[in-house]
Amino acid sequence: MRQDYRLLVLDLDGTLTNSKKEISPRNFRTLLRLQQSGVRLVLASGRPTYGIAPLAEQLQMKEHNGYILSYNGGEIINWNTGELLYKNLLPDEVLPILYETAIDNRQTILTYDNEFILTENPDDPYVKKEAFLNKMQVRRVDNFLQETPRPLPKCLIVGEPEQLINTETELSLRLQRQISVYRSEPYFLELVPLGIDKARSLAVLLEKIGITREEMIA
């Protein structure tokens, strides 16, 4: 890496991690050496913060002043201090619409609370897949709208890929000026604040820590 780079930004799934969701030994050693030389790491992912935390701990990012950019840029955390530097949250008024659309289409909606995934359907196979990917526990709630903390950084509607088509179309049209709706996997429909974008959040981070675009590699 060029000597004038000060920040290395990495996506997780399929970039930092392999098909087993693990960091290869060679990459692990290389990233430790980079941090020891003064380069700071940013892990940037659509995952929730607690789904990124185990990788940040493995890479010793707390000791080397790294950052987590979670929810696809919805939150930025200084991993050394735990300080939340930036957040972008879903408007409360859309949550009943998201919930009712999922129920009407016989799909499962979930969200996150620290180390837990919250859902009314913990046995849904796609909920279990999300829990496995993020190494998080699933907590069952009796009433999603009443028992989830507000405001929320993100919701996920999960289901069979072909059955999510109508849900995606309906919510994209109905909430087009209020939230962003997209697929991260064929069976995962992401529901995030409008304008969520890793590049925008990275620009915020660069300004806060006094590093230029030219000193960052992503």
Image (spheres, rainbow, N blue to C red):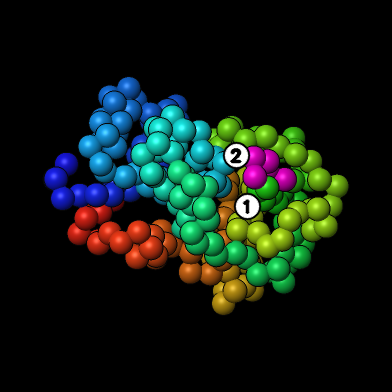
- Amino acid at dot 2: Glu
Q: Is residue 33 above or below residue 202?
A: above
Residue occupying the point 51% across, 38% down: 53
Given residues 107 and 144, the one toward you in this image is 144
Left or right of 54? Residue 93 is right
Secondary element under disc 2, as helix, strand or loop, is helix
Q: Is residue 172 above or below residue 158?
A: below
Question: Could you tell me what secondary structure mostly forms the magenta stretch?
Answer: strand
Residue ID for mark 2: 130
Residue occupying the point 29% across, 37% down: 35
Image quarter in which the N terminus is found: top left
180 part of magenta stretch: no
Q: Which mark is residue 114?
A: none
Residue ID for mark 1: 156
Q: Residues within 10 Å of mark 2 (few under 14, many from 20)?
A: many
- Amino acid at dot 1: Leu
* Residue 181 makes an appearance in the image: no
Given residues 208 and 173, the one toward you in this image is 208
Residue bounds of the magenta highlight: 114-118
Residue occupying the point 68% across, 62% down: 151
Left or right of 125? Residue 47 is left
Mark 1 and mark 2 in contact (Cβ < 8 Å)?
yes
Where in the figure is residue 54, as x and y percent of width and height? 50, 33
Given residues 38 and 177, the one toward you in this image is 38
Where in the figure is residue 77, as x and y percent of width and height? 49, 52
Give residue 164's quadrant in the image: bottom right
Given residues 13 and 174, the one toward you in this image is 13
Residue occupying the point 65% across, 59% down: 152
